[in-house]
């Protein structure tokens, strides 16, 4: 008894039906009488492998069992084979597998899939023999953008696209080839045909190195003639056959707990080094086909070359916005255009949310262990550290941040944030709770802390990378996926961050970045039914609008860090030198573009004049200039509209009767520079006493000696409550004042001292919810209660 299925012939001829025959043994010519036949439908993109896996193997086993039973029961038929069915076709050889281009696309497709793997359908192009594998019909009718590949004899040149190689039949219809084998035997993705060498190799963790050595042992067992398996060892050139491919795949799948691995992967990475790189990418979840194509903007600046992505980042790819819409991002130092950036549209938001949802529900991100998730975040932090000078340079260019401050704070604290939350990944845990038993049975109640799903994060322009990191690190540590909307005026470090997530091996779709307007992108994220959480830093007015949208859409979870008018109270018994130094920092740090900046200083009457004299003396020492100069103290304001707002703010202060001691004007030079400014004699009813400048403007008011409760009442007479401060040597006074101040953070004899482990967030109309610290994790988790009865 023998079995036969001419699957190659079936595919080459484009048969719609295929099958196999079980027949009585003869003299070896396959002409014996038929015992049993089965058939199946041949799908348009079937290959020998898919037919085998879907039909021949499972149904063949069943057929053989059925045939044996029929023989045992004496019921097995003997049906003479028709002459047509008994013909013999020789095995396809490489020289006869050349593609004939003068035929329709479907026929070319059938020829390629029928010759898939062995011997491989081939053609000549680019002065070498190219063998095509993994063909599918393209029925869209639209020719994707790409690079032309001239093919002698073809009806039209092929087109190398992101999806693969588009080929044309003589009927102008298309097929798509995903893999190409070069003449030297190397298999590549068709989409990479015109690309150079692959990207730099991944650096393996200790656990991954252990896995690599275990896989090396598998190769050694399969290739006994190879004395030592090295990175350059080629699986097939070392004598492996197709059956060895199956063995390798199955052994590695078992070794890696059922990792999705296909025979095709071995052909695509035939050397041991390439195979390990492919395997590690899959283990990390970065198993999409092909390398990410990035269209960089390259600039020689700050004694280095920086490379900045400028497109949207959706589903692990940098892509143009719908309609190829773009806008200019401006360098505030001189007002010049840095580059064109893709401007996201509503449809782009929908695509990004869909990618994030798929990554959360179906991707590897939700399947890896919490500890492995932490490893990925640690790796991301390491990459940010490796690129810290480049990131700081981009912050200086795009946001006007003084380079030395950007290196220490904008970037430095971002790195610390990811490392801190990476450590939390495997420490998020629920609890067991004793409850009343449902007698005579018993109960067990436990809680689980789970990620909420797709999160939208909307960040401001003052600390573009740091604000992204404060929210995104906690969001990812909790196991969520995210769509990030950077401020429209400062998108570049967010896009560079997106590139680093790919390099770190964070699975595609987990992080998405959409530069664009708040009214369009931010609004759609707030309204989107598949977004389960919004984290926002910005104005109170916009925060209120986001709250309303989140409630109306699907009652999203929301955390808001909003406006501030933080009071700083300086008592006469303070260390005056320190109070002057920290008072300067409380206002002028990061050009005053600081959410917790001291919006109003209350100085006790007996030291008021001396404090003002020293402050003005220090202000006049400040160097205003290019943020990339290492001795610059004060860079440009973030953007032109903000500069104009600061000028109006100061003009209003003067008009209402406050004393402008220094500053208050634009610096007469190109760019968006504003003088560090000091106002005194500011009374409680004045606009500048109540409203935030968000710039380098110090607002000083007096209070009577010893009148602690009155100054506290004045300090709290605001709807904002983000931060506050007090300077005094009296510990009792410090404790009393810090207890009475209505703000989420109180600084005592210091200012601006935030840390990744300390929760940060406001009271009243400065918002709710926390960034940083363990408390931040709760913003991105939901608690589920589970009760058992036993």
Image (spheres, rainbow, N blue to C red):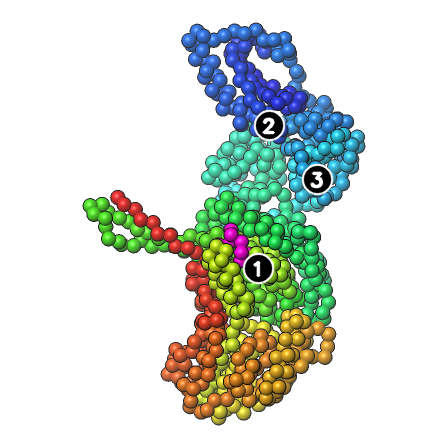
Q: What element carries label 3?
A: loop
Spatial CA span between label 3 and label 2: 22 Å
Position of residue 467 measured from the top left corner of the image (x, y, whole percent)? 54, 64
Separation of residues labelled 2 and 1 (CA atoms): 44 Å
Residue 185 seen in the figure: no
Q: Closest to the observer: 489 or 345? A: 345
Q: Residue at x 45, y 74 (%)?
A: 743
Which residue is at 26% across, 53% downward?
A: 435
In the foreground, 69 or 379: 69
Disc number lying in front (2 or 1): 1
Distance between the alpha carbons at the discs numbered 1 and 3? 32 Å
Q: Which mark is residue 142?
A: 3
- Label 3 environment density (alpha carbons within 10 Å; few <14, some 14–19, many ≥20): few
Between 488 and 508, the one nearer to me in the picture: 488
Q: In this view, does 671 lie to the left or right of 650?
A: right
The span picked out in magenta is 525-533
Q: Earlier in the sequence, mark 3 or mark 2?
A: 2
Q: In which quarter of the image is the C terminus?
A: top left
């Amino acid at each position: 008894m023998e079995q036969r299925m001419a699957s190659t012939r079936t595919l080459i001829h484009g048969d719609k039906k295929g099958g196999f025959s079980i027949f009585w043994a003869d003299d070896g010519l396959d002409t014996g009488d038929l015992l049993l036949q089965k058939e199946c439908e041949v799908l348009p993109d079937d290959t020998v492998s898919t037919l085998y896996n879907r039909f021949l193997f499972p149904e063949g086993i069943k057929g053989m069992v059925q045939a044996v039973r029929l023989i045992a029961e004496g019921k097995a038929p003997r049906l003479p084979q028709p002459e047509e069915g008994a013909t013999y076709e020789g095995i396809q050889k490489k020289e006869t597998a050349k593609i004939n281009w003068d035929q329709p696309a479907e026929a070319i497709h059938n020829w390629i899939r029928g010759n898939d793997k062995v011997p491989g359908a081939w053609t000549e192009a680019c002065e070498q023999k190219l063998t095509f594998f993994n063909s599918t019909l393209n029925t869209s009718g639209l020719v994707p953008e790409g690079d032309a590949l001239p093919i002698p004899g073809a009806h039209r040149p092929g087109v190398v696209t992101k999806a693969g190689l588009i080929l044309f039949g003589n009927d102008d219809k298309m097929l798509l080839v995903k893999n190409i084998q070069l003449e030297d035997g190397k298999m590549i993705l068709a989409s990479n045909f015109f690309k150079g060498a692959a990207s730099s190799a991944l650096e393996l963790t200790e656990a991954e190195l252990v896995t690599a050595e275990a896989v090396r042992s598998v190769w050694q067992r399969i290739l006994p003639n190879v004395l030592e398996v090295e990175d350059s060892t080629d699986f097939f050139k070392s004598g492996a056959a197709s059956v060895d491919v199956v063995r390798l795949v199955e052994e590695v799948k078992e070794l890696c707990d059922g990792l999705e691995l296909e025979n095709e992967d071995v052909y695509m990475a035939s050397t041991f080094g390439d195979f390990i790189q492919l395997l590690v990418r899959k283990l990390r979840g970065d198993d999409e086909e092909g390398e990410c194509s990035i269209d960089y903007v390259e600039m020689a600046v700050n004694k280095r070359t920086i490379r900045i992505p400028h497109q949207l980042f959706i589903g692990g790819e940098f892509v143009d916005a719908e309609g190829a819409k773009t806008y200019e991002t401006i360098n505030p130092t001189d007002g010049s255009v840095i580059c064109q950036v893709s401007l996201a549209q509503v449809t782009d938001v929908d695509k990004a949310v869909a990618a994030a949802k798929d990554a959360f529900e179906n991707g590897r991100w939700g399947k890896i262990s919490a500890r492995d998730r932490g490893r990925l975040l640690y790796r991301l932090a390491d990459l940010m550290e490796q690129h810290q000078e480049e990131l700081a340079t981009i912050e200086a260019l795009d946001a006007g941040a003084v380079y030395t401050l950007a290196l220490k704070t904008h970037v430095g604290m971002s790195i610390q944030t990811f490392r801190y939350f990476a450590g939390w990944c495997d420490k998020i845990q629920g609890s067991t709770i004793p409850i009343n038993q449902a007698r005579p049975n018993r109960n067990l109640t436990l809680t689980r802390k789970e990620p909420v799903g797709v999160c939208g994060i909307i960040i401001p322009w003052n600390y573009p990378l740091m604000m992204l990191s404060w929210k995104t690190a906690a969001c990812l540590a909790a196991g969520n996926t995210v769509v990030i909307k950077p401020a429209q005026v400062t998108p570049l470090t967010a896009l560079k961050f997106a590139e680093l997530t790919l390099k770190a091996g964070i699975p595609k779709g987990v992080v998405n970045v959409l530069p664009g307007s708040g009214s369009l992108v931010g609004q759609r994220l707030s309204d989107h039914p598949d977004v389960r959480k919004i984290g926002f830093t910005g104005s109170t007015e916009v925060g209120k609008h986001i709250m309303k949208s989140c409630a109306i859409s699907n009652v999203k979870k929301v955390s808001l860090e909003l406006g501030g008018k933080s009071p700083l109270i300086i008592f006469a018994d303070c260390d005056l030198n320190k109070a002057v130094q920290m008072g300067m920092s409380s206002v002028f740090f990061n050009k005053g573009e600081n959410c917790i900046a001291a919006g109003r200083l209350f100085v006790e009457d007996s030291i008021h004049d001396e404090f003002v004299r020293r402050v003005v003396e220090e202000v006049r020492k400040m160097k205003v200039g290019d943020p990339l100069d290492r001795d610059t103290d004060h860079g440009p304001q973030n953007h032109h509209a903000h500069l104009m707002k600061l000028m109006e703010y100061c003009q209003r202060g003067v008009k209402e009767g406050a004393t402008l001691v220094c500053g208050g004007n634009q610096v007469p030079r190109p760019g968006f520079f504003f003088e560090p400014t000091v106002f005194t004699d500011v009374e409680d009813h004045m606009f500048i006493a109540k409203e935030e400048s968000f710039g380098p403007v110090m607002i000083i008011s007096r209070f009577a000696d010893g009148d602690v409760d009155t100054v506290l009442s004045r300090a709290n007479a605001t709807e904002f409550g983000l931060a506050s401060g007090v300077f005094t040597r009296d510990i009792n006074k410090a404790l009393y004042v810090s207890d009475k101040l209505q703000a989420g953070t109180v600084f005592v004899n210091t200012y601006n001292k935030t840390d990744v482990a300390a929760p940060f967030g406001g009271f009243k109309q400065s918002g709710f919810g926390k960034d940083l610290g363990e408390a931040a994790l709760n913003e991105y988790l939901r608690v589920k209660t589970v009760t058992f009865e036993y």
